[in-house]
Image (spheres, grey):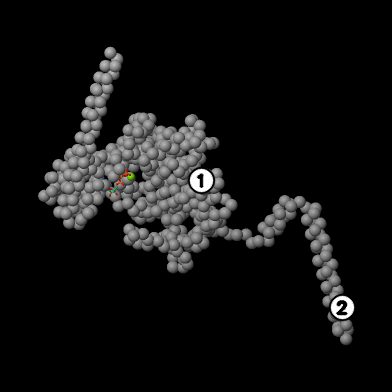
Amino acid sequence: MFSQTNMPQSVSTLFSAYASFAGSMMLIRSMANELIPYELRSYLSTAIHYLFTPLSLNTTLVIDEHCGMSRNQVYDAAEIYLKTKISPSTERLRIGKTSRQKNFSVAIEKGEVVADVYENIKLKWAYVCTEPQKTIHSGEKRRFELSFNKKYREKIMDRYLPHVLKRAKELKDEEKVVKLYNRECPFNNEDGGDHGGMWGSINLEHPSTFDTLALDPELKKMIVDDLKRFLGRKEFYKKVGKAWKRGYLLSGPPGTGKSSLIAAMANYLKFDIYDLELTSIYSNSDLRRVLLSTTNRSILVIEDIDCSVEMRDRQQGGDQYGGSPSSRLTLSGLLNFIDGLWSSCGDERIIVFTTNHKDRLDSALLRPGRMDVHINMSYCKPQAFSTLASNYLDIRDKNHDLYEEIEGLMEITHVTPAEVAEELMASENADVALEGLVNFLKRKHSEANQVKSEENDKVEGGEAKKLRSDDDEGRTFF
Ligand SMILES: Nc1ncnc2c1ncn2[C@@H]1O[C@H](COP(=O)(O)OP(=O)(O)OP(=O)(O)O)[C@@H](O)[C@H]1O
Ligand SMILES: [Mg+2]
């Protein structure tokens, strides 16, 4: 009986005690909110959180894709290295293959985690991507997060990361995939500014090599030797205090193989190509950003420089080229700019300018010491033809009846390797293809003769007219 009457009473006491406690807490909280400044409150809550959360045993290294404006070497190395660490437990993979690739290319997909073990230390690599924010004109942000037990931090920094860099370099050399970088389509905003436009890459699938390139053999040997010497002179460049770079100026009519030579150089050196369109550069800072985001062991290509320099005349304001005369872009100015930049952060760089009109170039660019090597790509001559005949029709050692006639015609006709290549591709039958080439050369030759005789006629006609008008003037004068 006692217990029956006492029970509800104790419950109600409990409730009323809780109610008054909750009421006081709310009062204290609202007083605290009013009396304690926000900063102190947030500090206290962090401190309380820290005290009551068990300490993490892990360290995480965040490896962003870019270091400021340059690419992060550790990120690039990790990307290659981790391909070898994909295990059957990896859930999502990115797969690709182009028509020329023999094997599938495999990469880890965003959000995936890959495990690695180094000297019995367990490591976890996570690939994290954050979507671009709509309000800010920027691309996707990519990074790797490497986590491990914090007691191994020194070992990871001193030994594991260098191991990843070294392994990635070995893999890259083995893989031998040369990349062609173009600037990704930039984001344009209302003021027409360029806020994205970093480099996007595809595998360079240009099959041109020094074997397939139709070029005077001596010139070819000179270029290959020059490249070899350049690669071996790291210490020399350091000693003389120059950026380890080499500049080539390729000139010649369209279709003489300037772009093919660049591809052959890239395939030979296993260097990536960065194809820079100067007309898409609007400011010094843009140019600096774009150049800094190119990697070492690469070829920077600026094609058709006689057309690119037209941008000098653009009227833009601020630090933009063309604004005031002092800030106008000249190619030798650009070279100075690149020299300055690469002497501090560039190694094994090649820069190639191409032009169809060497005569139109600024003489400052042609001065000795500006571009190291000038290469004139000219019309197809018999020796270059031998390479094409062997490439396209498997004809070796001048082993064809029409060979002599073709060589003779080539000595007297301006024909580009591209034109010859097109004729040779017309048929798989060597007789038919070479017959076609002979006709083509004859046609070109007679057309050139006709143009020449018309020009002569014009000159002679002009002179006759001039003589007559001199006569007239003389007569009027007297
Ligand atoms: N020297 C060459 N050796 C072998 N093939 C060549 C050569 N020159 C041209 N060709 C052939 O002609 C095509 C066009 O040549 P390429 O694009 O290299 O010429 P280019 O000099 O860069 O011309 P442009 O001045 O128009 O850029 C090549 O894809 C190749 O098939
Ligand atoms: Mg070209």
Question: Of residues 390 and 278, which is closer to you in this image?
Answer: 278
Residue 97, compared with residue 199, is above or below; it is below
Residue 459, compared with residue 249, is above or below; it is above
> Going 44% across and 62% down the picture, which residue do you hit?
94
Q: Amino acid at mark 2?
A: Gln
| Residue 99 x/y as whole percent | 34, 60
> Going 87% across and 78% down the picture, which residue do you hit?
9
Q: Amino acid at mark 1?
A: Asp
Question: Of residues 10 and 325, which is closer to you in this image?
Answer: 325
Assign a secondary structure to mark 1: loop
Q: What's the mark number on residue 337?
A: none
- Label 1 environment density (alpha carbons within 10 Å; few <14, some 14–19, many ≥20): some
Q: What's the mark number on residue 194?
A: 1
> Going 52% across and 44% down the picture, which residue do you hit?
193
Ligand 2 - quadrant of the structure image: top left
Question: Circle 2 sits on which residue?
Answer: 9
Q: Quadrant of the C terminus?
A: top left
| Residue 438 x/y as whole percent | 16, 47
| Residue 17 x/y as whole percent | 84, 70
> Going 79% across and 59% down the picture, which residue do you hit?
29
- Label 2 environment density (alpha carbons within 10 Å; few <14, some 14–19, many ≥20): few
1 or 2: tag closer to the N-terminus: 2
Q: Quadrant of the N terminus?
A: bottom right
Residue extending farthest to the bottom is 1
Q: Determine whether, in the image, residue 35 is placed left or right of residue 445.
A: right
Q: Determine whether, in the image, residue 281 is placed left or right of residue 463.
A: right
In the picture, residue 249 is in which quadrant?
top left
Residue 255 in view here: yes
Q: Determine whether, in the image, residue 101 is placed left or right of residue 155.
A: left
